[in-house]
């Protein structure tokens, strides 16, 4: 197990969250949800601390974090951007929209801009197939996006 490299205040926050759920291993998803809400993501050090506090194997925590798409092990930008690459979006040009986002942001999928403003991910289906291609910026959904729209969408968040 790696050495925990968290500040004392972050360690105490995680311990307090675990205590608020009675250090019950059955509450691991609730604990992770609350901790990710504070940190924005769940690095290995946090997963190890949660496992220790709940007295469960790190592999169980990692399995949960890696299985559920809600959880992330990498930091997100202030404005996370997700491009839908489901079938409807893909056939209507989502890949070109993704390429334009990568070009304008100067990052690849899975990365965060140096200023921390934007991160870029892909997902399989937003459930708005009639509006394809679709991207999400935070909780806001943009439909019928073309590469020409990317500059204006990004400008809303700068």
Image (cartoon, helix red, strand yellow):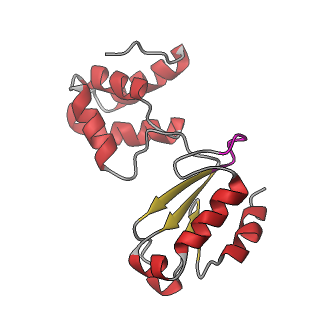
Q: Which residue is depicted at the point 36% across and 22% down?
A: 49
- Expressed as whole percent of the image width and height from the top left, the position of residue 48 reads 34, 23
Q: Which residue is depicted at the point 40% across and 12% down?
A: 3
Q: Which residue is depicted at the point 25% across and 39% down?
A: 63
Residue closer to the observer: 78 or 119: 119
- Expressed as whole percent of the image width and height from the top left, the position of residue 127 reads 42, 76
Q: Toward which corner of the image does residue 151 lie, by quadrant?
A: bottom right
Q: Toward which corner of the image does residue 2 lie, by quadrant?
A: top left
Residue closer to the observer: 106 or 149: 106
**Quadrant position of the N terminus in the picture:** top left
Residue that sits furthest to the bottom in the current view: 130
Q: Which residue is depicted at the point 40% across and 52% down?
A: 70
Asked if residue 92 shows in the view, the reply is yes
- Expressed as whole percent of the image width and height from the top left, the position of residue 155 reads 78, 63
Q: Is 146 within the magenta?
A: no
Q: Is residue 32 above or below residue 158?
A: above
Horizontal side, residue 117 vs residue 46: left or right: right
Horizontal side, residue 113 vs residue 66: left or right: right
Horizontal side, residue 27 vs residue 140: left or right: left
Magenta stretch prevailing secondary structure: loop
Q: Is residue 117 above or below residue 127?
A: above
**Quadrant position of the C terminus in the picture:** bottom right
Asked if residue 140 shows in the view, the reply is no
Residue closer to the observer: 90 or 116: 90
Stretch in magenta = 113-118
Horizontal side, residue 34 vs residue 116: left or right: left
């Amino acid at each position: 197990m790696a050495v925990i490299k968290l500040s004392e205040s972050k360690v105490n926050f995680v311990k307090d969250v675990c205590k608020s759920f009675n250090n019950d291993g059955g509450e691991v998803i609730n604990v992770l949800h609350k901790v990710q809400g504070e940190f924005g993501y769940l690095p290995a050090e946090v997963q190890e601390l949660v496992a220790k506090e709940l007295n469960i194997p790190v592999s169980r925590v990692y399995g949960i974090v890696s299985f559920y798409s809600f959880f992330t092990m990498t930091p997100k930008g202030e404005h996370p951007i997700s491009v839908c690459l489901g079938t409807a979006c893909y056939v209507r040009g989502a890949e070109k929209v993704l390429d334009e986002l990568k070009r304008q942001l100067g990052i690849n999928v899975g990365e965060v801009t140096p200023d921390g403003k934007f991160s870029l991910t892909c997902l399989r289906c937003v459930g708005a197939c009639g509006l394809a291609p679709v991207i999400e910026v935070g909780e806001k959904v943009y439909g019928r996006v073309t590469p020409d729209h990317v500059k204006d969408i990004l400008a809303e968040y700068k």
